[in-house]
Structures are given as structure tokens and as C-alpha cells.
Amino acid sequence: MRAKTLVFMGTPDIACPTLTAASKAGWQVKGVVTQPDRPAGRGKKVRRCPVAAQADDLGFLVLQPERIAALKEELKSLDAQACVVMAMGQILPKEILDIFPLGCVNLHTSLLPLLRGASPINQAIIQGFDTTGVTAMMMDQGMDTGHIIMQEELIIDMQETAGSLADRLSALAADLLPRTLEALWKGEATWTPQDGGKATYAPVMKKTDGLLDWNKSAEELDRQVRGMDPWPSAFTSLNQKQLRLFAPTCLSDFDHKAKPGTVLPPQMERPDMLWVACGQGALGLGQVQAAGKRRMEARNFIHGLRDKQGFCLGE
């Protein structure tokens, strides 16, 4: 009788619960493939990537190639039935996809074909989606174009950040994977082709994507701040120095008559927040990080200003 064996591929924190779920579901993890460890932090010390660190703790073989294609013969030798991929950061070539008899299952954090690509969690918030979810997909050579096996939907909260949504989707993926693998193992999985005509895309996020244009509406800027929290983070400038902005946020539609970017007096809704005039309405910000400083509560930052109003951000 065939053994339930798999190779897991993933790199960041969001993939860790899914690796644990695969092991607890009775599948033998023959190997874990991650991106190579990279220098990180101010000291630029090489830091073990989260999935590799977890695999170390669980006693799994860890492989960290620059390109997955280089592992072809080693992956064949592992003789695994399936491959599970979550947030690996590389597209698998055909010679790797063909190694596994049950195929390669990718867990993508959107309801495909919506938001194919690298930043579906950020973009679901930035674009104002009410719902998102996780798709278990049979991988092909395209970018998130394979047949859908299962999907689970999740409602996006009003104060959702990219960080909080990632945590919830990570847990959802860990719940979805064992059911997906069981269906594949029993030959009961259904494969539904994606409608490419409905596809949208979520490209790789860049730090420059966080720059706020205060001429936009408070609602748009609210989504941008939350969708960039914690990374790459929304930012503006104050006295020609960068000021990073974070959730929690609050919206006000009062007619302020102020130039967009102007720091406003504290508002009744949330007097503890930093309030900024927008092209339409005003946006309250709960946390900020000035250049060379640590992230702090907005009320503490406000106390550090010489006056609580009249400053203009973005200049």
C-alpha cells in the first residue's frame, strides 16, 4: 500500500501552520523546501527563515536552493506522493511538477481567479474587498492558473490590516489542507478550471507603494494604510523626514476646508488619534513611526509636536 508522503514548500510565517497541519494529518513529510536564509535586520545577520526554523524543530530535512529546478534529482529520490506549496516565492517548472504522482497543491490566499500573484492579502484590503479566502489549487506552469480543488471564504473585518488578515488566512489554509489532501488520496477531488476572463492580479509590493497622496479620499487612504500594515507600511513626510503610519484608523466625513495633508485638531470620535485632512473627509491614525524612532501611539506623537494643528504632511 502506498504511504502518505509529501514534500512541503514555503518560506514565511504564514506557511508554518500549514506545515504543521500536513504532519498532524498523518502525512509523512519527506522534505521541506524553502528560500535560502537571507541577511535581515540592522545588523544584516543571516536569519533562518520561519519555515526552515520550524522544520528544524520538527526534525524534517530542509533544502534551500536558489532555484527549485536544481533539486530535480533530489526530489525524485525522496519518492513523495504529493507536494504542498504555500508562499514559496517561485513558480515550479514542469520537470518539478511532474515528479509527484498526486500532483502539487498550492494554497493561495485569495479566491482565485481573483488576485493572482504575490500580494493578494494586501490588495484585498487596498481594493476594498468585503471577502477573500484561501484556494487549494492544482499547480500548473502558470502563475496561480491551475484548476481549483477547494475554496474557503473569509469576511474581511472593518479594521483588518494585512497582518491580521494574514494570520486568519494562515489558520484557514491549515484547516483546508488536510481535507484537500484526503480528497486527492481517495481520488475524490474535483478539479474546476479557472475563468481566466475574471482574473485580476496582485503584483509584488514595493516600499514606494506606501507613499500616501493626501488628495485622495479618507476612505482610499484608510485602505492603503491598513493594507500596508505591517509591511511595507504607509508613509508620508513631516518637515522633510519620513513618517510611517499604521492602524488602527478612523474615518470622519466632516467638511474641514483644510489643505489635504494638514494635521487637524483632535476629533470627537477618537481624540487620541492623529487626524489628517484628506481630499475628501479626514483620516485618524492610531500609530506612527518617525524617522529614527520606534513605532508609538499617535497620542504620544501628538504631545511631542509644538502645536496640535497646522502642520502639513507630505511636504
Image (tube, grey):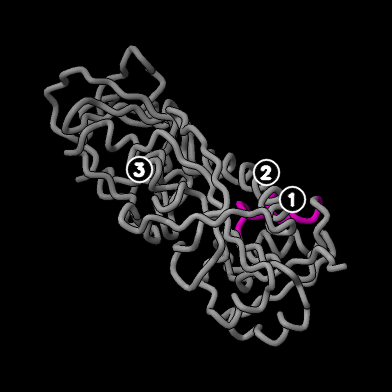
**What span is colored magenta in the figure?**
12-24
Amino acid type at mark 1: Ala
Disc assigned to residue 73: none
Total labels: the figure holds: 3
Identify which residue is drawn at 26% across, 30% down: 276
Q: Quadrant of residue 84?
A: bottom right
Disc assigned to residue 126: 3
- Describe residue 78's horizontal placement relative to residue 273 as left or right: right
Disc assigned to residue 21: 1
Label 2 or label 3, whichever comes before in sequence order = 3
Front of the two marks 3 and 1: 1
Dominant SS in magenta: helix
Quarter of the figure that contains the C terminus: top left
- Describe residue 62's horizontal placement relative to residue 238 as left or right: right
Residue that lies at the very extreme toward the top in this rendered image: 268
Query: Which structural element holds mark 3?
Result: helix
Identify which residue is drawn at 72% across, 50% down: 178
In this rendering, is residue 99 above or below 106?
below
Residue indicated by mark 2: 175
Q: Position of residue 226 (x, y in %)?
A: 41, 38
